[in-house]
Amino acid sequence: MIVLGLSGLPNSQRRLRETNPDIDPLDARITQGLDSAAAIIVDGTLVAAASEERFDGDKGTGALPRQAIAWCLAEAGVQPEDVDVVAHGFDYDRHQRAFVLSRQYFDEVLSSQTVRDALTEAGWPTLAEKLQPVEHHRAHALSAVVPSGYESGLAVVSDGMGEIDSVTVYRFRGTELEKLHSQPIASSLGILYSIGTRFLGFQFNNDEYKVMGLAPYGDPERYREVFRKLTRFDHDKGSVVIDWPKGALTDPEGGYPQARALLEEQTFTPSPPDGSIQRDEADFAASMQECLTDLLVSLVGHWLEKTGETSLCLAGGTFLNCKSNQSIADLPGLERMFVQPASGDDGTSLGAAYAVAEDLEPVRTPFDPYLGAQYSADEVRAVLEARPDLQWREVGLTDEYLAAAADDIAADRIIAVFHGRMEFGPRALGNRSIVARPDGDRIKDRINSAVKFREAFRPFAPAVHVDDRDRLFVTRGFDPDHYMLSTADVRPEAKPMLSGIVHEDDSARIQTVTQDLNPTFATLLEQVRARTGVGCVVNTSFNVKGQPLIMDPATAVDTFSRIALDRLYIEGFVVEGTPS
């Protein structure tokens, strides 16, 4: 049995641009169906998954994932006619009566027929015939439930919006989902946080992580009452309520101007962001982050207590907020917790495939996030031989090679590493990463100014060997720690050793590295520990501002040649750069 999963709505962004040709770039992602991706399951085994942006370079694109589909089929060694079902992570068809006043929009953007038509136009009529829509929040939920391996528990989905809901709570037994609660789009935590993001001058549905990074620099007390008047938790219903005034959520394509005007009336007039830390903006970010965390903790805590469950699965874009996830992990009685690494809509390609595959045969293969493309030494050599302007040598993926990388890190050099399969989801987890010594000289400034070209207030994350984690960080050791999905407090005595990754609130978004999950990266950290005494490095994505996570050797070498990295370690090759 072969199941191909898809996410995205092929016509959504095109229609937004056509109907709003002068749209502000900050509002260009206020639409459904972004982050298109493909995943494939063959006879109960998850073979591959990748986002379309990794292939076409269009960050967050919602277009039909043509290249991701073709790659998944090739990786599985199958033809389109071999696929039994194509699962799609939206099912607006069952809710079409809710769009009676916007029938044209439904027909042009939301209907499953648009995906069938796009597949046919792309030359895959056999795939179009096999399309099976899956309800959006069900796809999100199963994207976490199945890979968690938990036999039972609670699954919570929170995002901007699904078809008609913004939060759904399920109890699960195996992969059977029992819906316990849902709440409407008007009370969307995702939309609330995104409107606040847009209010601060960042891009809606894209830059929320910047607000999360800014929040620790602010005082949440200053605007706390603004959010307390706007939001509340209904303990009787177990529901988040957001009391937007009538009309506040109109004109989304214009960036929800009435909602932003309401915030401005009660707070301040924001200045365009310039990368610096402004007091008003930081205090607002802190208040909004506190509000989100408090509401999520109340929501999840209520349903854990009500059901008596001790295992928790989370998915949906809201749960990419690692600060909130840390507080959720601290809930009493919680014994284990899994957050899907691709918690955004890219992960619904995986969840939709799981939903269909589980109806046919159990999927019980161990999960890891390294589901993307990988490249051979011959492919890398061919790229390097075409670049006479670069100096490089071939060592092979040997102890000598990893020792050389560890020597560079210990000597306070900034290097890039490119090994094995690409990560699925937004985080770089050691296979497409820039790494450096965590206590390096001005390490944050050096990476920000010379490599990443990004806001100075944004923190860098640590990758830490599992054997060093507990002496450096305070954490419950839940699964999100493996995927940079939860922050942890840095132990006071460890701060001098980790100065480059300690955020303003003394936390860090950790990645715990194990030999089982990533042996190459784990061995590198062991080599770093042998030289520095700490099995920990700064780990940030190998890309530059506005660029998706790098997928292929040609892009990796080209990017390396344009930024101030010291060396590139790529599939056993060491490429020289300009010393920083």
Image: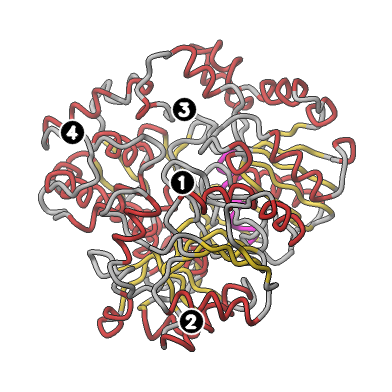
User: Tag 3 or tag 2, which sits nearer the N-term?
Assistant: 3
Q: In the rendered view, does 511 fall on the left or right side of 220?
A: right
Q: CA distance from mark 2 to mark 3?
A: 44 Å
Residue 411 makes an appearance in the image: yes
Q: Amino acid at mark 4?
A: Leu
The percent position of residue 190, horizontal first and vertical second, equals: 38, 41
Bin the neighbour count of mark 4 within 10 Å (Cα to Cα): few under 14, some 14-19, many 20 and up: some
- According to the picture, the residue beneath numbered tag 1 turns out to be 317
Q: Position of residue 421 (x, y in %)?
A: 67, 59
| Dominant SS in magenta | helix
N-terminal of the two: label 1 or label 4? 4
Name the secondary structure under disc 1.
helix
Residue 180 can be seen in this image: no
Q: Which residue is mark 3?
A: 31
- Is residue 142 covered in magenta? yes
Looking at the picture, how far across and down is residue 196, in whole percent? 27, 38
Which of the two labelled residues, at mark 1 and mark 2, occupies the earlier sequence position?
1
The residue at the point 31 percent across, 76 percent down is 490
Mark 4 to mark 3 CA distance (whole Å): 22 Å
| Boundaries of the magenta span | 135-147
- Distance between the Cα atoms at labels 1 and 2? 34 Å
The amino acid beneath tag 3 is: Thr
Q: Residue at x 35, y 78 (%)?
A: 474
In the picture as drawn, the residue positioned furthest to the front comes out as 388
| Position of residue 335 in the picture relative to residue 226 (left or right) | right
Q: Which residue is mark 4?
A: 263
Above or below: residue 372 compared with residue 460: above
User: Which of the two discs, 1 and 3, labels the residue nearer the N terminus?
Assistant: 3
Q: For numbered disc 3, what is the local secondary structure?
A: loop
Numbered disc 2: secondary structure: helix
What is the distance, in whole Å, between disc 2 and disc 4 at their CAs? Answer: 48 Å
- The residue at which mark 2 appears reads as 528
